[in-house]
Amino acid sequence: MRHNKAGRRLGRTTSHREAMFRNMVTSLLNHEKITTTDAKAKEIRVVAEKMITLGKRGDLHAMRQAASYIREKSVVTKLFSTIAPRYKDRPGGYTRIVKLGIRQGDAAPVSIIELVEEEMKPKKAAQPKSAAPKAPKAPKTVAAAPVVEEPAAVQTALADPAEVCEAKAD
């Protein structure tokens, strides 16, 4: 049983898997979008978001930690100079996985993992309700329903019970 063992093995040895993740994260940060299988994309997401968090820290130690994982020096520079400042106000969720469907050759589920493009805008402060009252909305006009005449039996049932008794006595 694999209790308390996180992560997918992906049918590879540990060294192969770690090397593959390093290459794929480097490519993701370089191109900002890559196509891969769903399982690999879900595993890469964790590592890529850690790298962007290191980039947001921006100190020398964080840069050295990122450089020890990412394969290319130019990608580390790009991470710290352009990618990390883009997400400075975002608390997490820097990547998006979009499922594409099934790969024809081996029927593997394929998806795109990409960096989220738009910057997260800070929420507006709640305005006090006492400021500038809104104009009242005009009432909605409802079309009148057609009038249907009721039969005499229904009308007598709806009438006052005392009158109905007197009418039957006559």
Image (cartoon, rainbow, N blue to C red):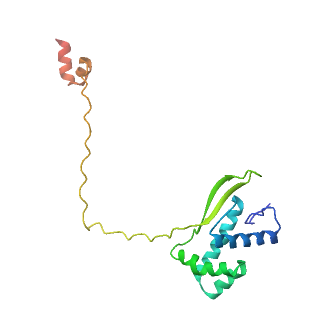
Q: Quadrant of the N terminus?
A: bottom right
Within the image, what quadrant is residue 52 found in? bottom right
Q: Residue at x 61, y 65 (%)?
A: 114
Residue 134 in the image: above or below residue 154: below
Outermost residue toward the top in this view: 170
Residue 57 in the image: above or below residue 143: below
Q: Position of residue 119 (x, y in %)?
A: 50, 70
Looking at the picture, tell me which residue is in the foreground, 132 or 6.
132
Looking at the picture, tell me which residue is in the foreground, 119 or 77.
77
Report if residue 87 is visible in the image: no
Q: Position of residue 91 (x, y in %)?
A: 54, 72
Q: Position of residue 55 (x, y in %)?
A: 60, 79
Residue 128 in the image: above or below residue 110: below
Looking at the image, residue 82 sits to the left or right of residue 101; the answer is left
Report if residue 94 is visible in the image: yes
Looking at the image, residue 73 sits to the left or right of residue 164; the answer is right
Q: Residue at x 73, y 72 (%)?
A: 23
Q: Position of residue 56 (x, y in %)?
A: 58, 79
Looking at the image, residue 69 sits to the left or right of residue 150; the answer is right
Within the image, what quadrant is residue 123 found in? bottom left
Looking at the image, residue 24 sits to the left or right of residue 90; the answer is right
Q: Residue at x 24, y 27 (%)?
A: 147
Within the image, what quadrant is residue 61 found in? bottom right
